[in-house]
Amino acid sequence: MEDNTLNKNLISYLDYLKYQKNYSDYTILSYKDDIVEYLNYLNSESLNYLDIEYSDIRFYLMYLKDTKKDNNSSIDRKLSSLRGFYKYMANEGIVKTNVFSLVNGPKKSKKLPRYFEYNELEEMFNIPDLNTPLGQRDRLILEMLYATGVRVGELVSIKVSDIDLGRKNIIILGKGNKERFVTYGEYCEDSLKEYLNDGRNTLNTKNSDYLFLNNNGGQLTERGVRFILDKIIKQTGINKSISPHMIRHSFATHLLNAGCDLLTVQKLLGHESIKATQIYTHVTTDRLKEVYYKSFPRAKIDE
């Protein structure tokens, strides 16, 4: 990537994602990594990114599949990143057309969302030491992620002024700068009050407006939350990887399993389309089958 014009175009696109599309830093970094990988491939093949043809893309897809051994989901994500980059350049007049709009990604295998059982979440809730400011903060991170189903970027952006303690509501600034209200229950309320009245006062050495603070008094980052969750699960007997989104999946799955309707879950999650929420119905359908075969007297023949 020695081409100064290329560097400027890439930086300009990443700025567009941040300031115009309001994407999170984590998402922008993923886009950047996908694009840089593609540009490095072009460089190895002596290809100019401004003169790419459909056949060049097909060879790149073969490289991802056969040489890098990427799975279909990973390839599809990389195509999406490049499609967005070339669409931006086409709109800016840098290239004549978005050649990536002609390319369809490989068929993705349907991947059901992974989630925690409630007893696993309870085990994690009991790990943070509530006698310390960081322990109070970490417990609240778990409680709030599960109680509200917010995305990690939304979580770290919460300010104390966004919280209505009386109504137990929080204003969340979601994707596309769209606001929504989420609510929380008594467990989260207890953790929130303890943290606000004790731990946060100790951590807040810089007079920050943000709810979640790091040990230096600054705003906790998305990466910081992931590090905290990794540290917590290693102290449990749970043999699963963890991510903030997995707790979000747990929130949605448990609501549906308890009989909540899909439209309500859609609004709580902040999904624009019901299609994004429908993936959880596969999980709950499996759960219904399990309950049916365990409970219904004529579901199976006794041996």
Image (cartoon, grey):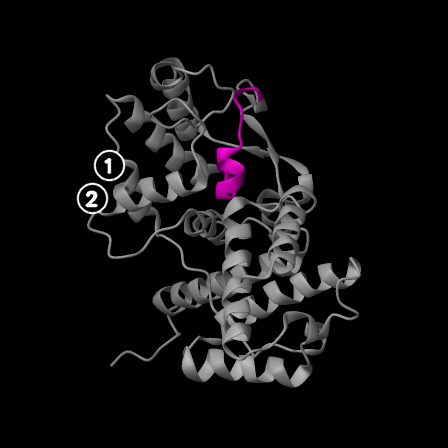
Question: Label 2, label 1: how many angstroms apart (C-alpha)?
Answer: 7 Å
Q: Residues within 10 Å of mark 2 (few under 14, many from 20)?
A: few
Residue tagged 2? 235
State the mark number for residue 127.
1
Marks 2 and 1: CB-CB under 8 Å? yes
- In the rendered view, would you say 278 is above or below 254? below
Element under disc 2:
loop
Q: Tell me the amino acid under the disc marked 1.
A: Ile
Q: Is residue 258 left or right of residue 123?
A: right
Q: Picture coordinates of residue 143 (x, y %)?
A: 40, 35
Magenta segment range? 148-161
Q: Is residue 96 magenta?
A: no
Evaluate whether residue 54 shows in this view. Answer: yes
215 with respect to 207 (left or right): left
Residue drawn at x 44%, y 34% as measured from the top left: 144
Q: Which callout, 2 or 1, points at the residue further toward the start of the chain?
A: 1
The answer to whether residue 149 is magenta is yes
